[in-house]
Amino acid sequence: MTINTPIRLGQLLLLVLLFLTGISVQAAPTDKPPFYRLQINGSTTYLLGSIHVGKADMYPMASVIERKLEDADGIVLEVLLEQANMVDLVQRYGMGAQDIDRELLNKRQAFCKNYATQCASIPYLKAWMQASVITMIRFGEQGLTPEYGVETWVSANYPEHKRYQLESTEFQFQLFSGLSNELQQLMLQDALEADEQELSALVEVWRSGNEADFLELIEDGFSNNRELMDAVLTERNYGMAAELSRLLDSNKQQKLVVIVGAAHLVGPESLPDIFKKRGAIVSSCWKVDC
C-alpha cells in the first residue's frame, strides 16, 4: 500500500502516546497488526502493536494472537490506568491557561457548538489536553470508544492474567505537558482539522501489517523534528525496553504478552530492534509460524 494521504505531526504525537487515531472497519481476524515473538535468555515473549480505541467488530483478533493471549500468564501494558489518580493528574498536568492563536480559538469554538457538554471543561485545559478531548469526541462520532481499544479489551477478556506496566500514566502526562506551547497548539489544530481520510490512513497501515508503510508514516510525520521524535518515541522505547528486560528477568517462568502502541514496534530503535541488538531472536508472527 502506498501512503498518499499526508499525516501531520500533531496526529503523530497522538499516535505515539495514549491516543492512536484510527477507524475500525470490518473483520479483525484478517488484520495483521505488528506482532512479534521475542526470544531472549531462555524466555519467549510476544509483542503486540495496539490501537487504543475501536469497535466491537475488531474482535476476536487473528487466531495466532488470541492463542498467545489464552496461553499467557501475564499481560504487559504501557500503563495500568487503575493505578493512576486521574483527577490529580489532570489538575497537575492538564490544566492551566495558555496563549492560543485567535484563529485556532475560533475553530475550537465552532467545533464545540455541537458538543457543549463534552467541551465544557476545554477552556480550562492545556492545549494538549484539549486536543485529546476533541480527538475522543471525534472517535465517538464514528462509534469508536476506548472500551474497544486493544489493551482495554484484552484486560477485560483475560481478567485472570497478571498485569504489568512499562511506564506510568503520570510519566505520559508529564511528557505531553512538557511539550512547547507551539507543539501543543499544533496538536489542537490537527485534532480540529483532521478528516476521515487522514484517520483511515493510520488504521489501514495498522491493519495491513506492512512495516515499511508504518515506518514511512512515522518518519514523514517527524521529518522536520528529530528532537521531538526522540522525546516522544525513541527515548521511550529505550525506557520500555529497560523495564521489559527487568520484568523478563524477574518472571522467567511466565509467558508474557506485551501490548504497546504500534509505533513502538516498527523501525530503527523500536522495541524489536533494541532487543535484536542485545542478542534476542525477534520474529514477525506473520512471517514465521509462532
Image (tube, rainbow, N blue to C red):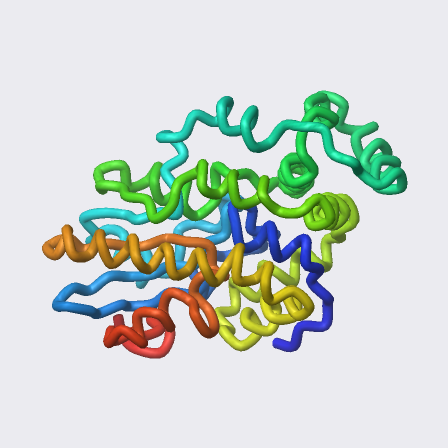
Quarter placement of the C terminus? bottom left
Q: Quadrant of the N terminus?
A: bottom right
- Give residue 135's position: percent from left, percent from top: 66, 41
**126 vs 116, nearest the viewer:** 126
Residue 277 visible in the snapshot: yes
Q: Is residue 30 visible?
A: no
Q: In this rendering, is residue 271 above or below 21?
A: below
State the residue at coordinates (16%, 56%). 249
Residue at position x 43%, y 70% from top? 269
Q: Nearer the viewer, residue 42 or 243?
A: 243
- x, y percentage for residue 131? 68, 40
| Horizontal side, residue 33 vs residue 162: left or right | right
Disc tally is 0
Residue 2 placement, left or right of 263: right
Q: Quadrant of residue 36?
A: bottom left
Q: Residue at x 53, y 57 (%)?
A: 231
212 lies above or below 200: below
Q: Quadrant of residue 165?
A: top left
In the rendered image of this protein, does residue 135 appear above or below residue 34? above
Q: Depth check: 169 or 120 in front?
A: 169
On screen, residue 214 versus residue 242, left or right, reads: right
> Measured from the top left, where is residue 79 in percent x and y?
39, 42
Tell whether 196 sits left or right of 209. right
Q: Residue at x 67, y 72 (%)?
A: 3
Q: Taking 3 as reference, is 199 above or below it?
A: above
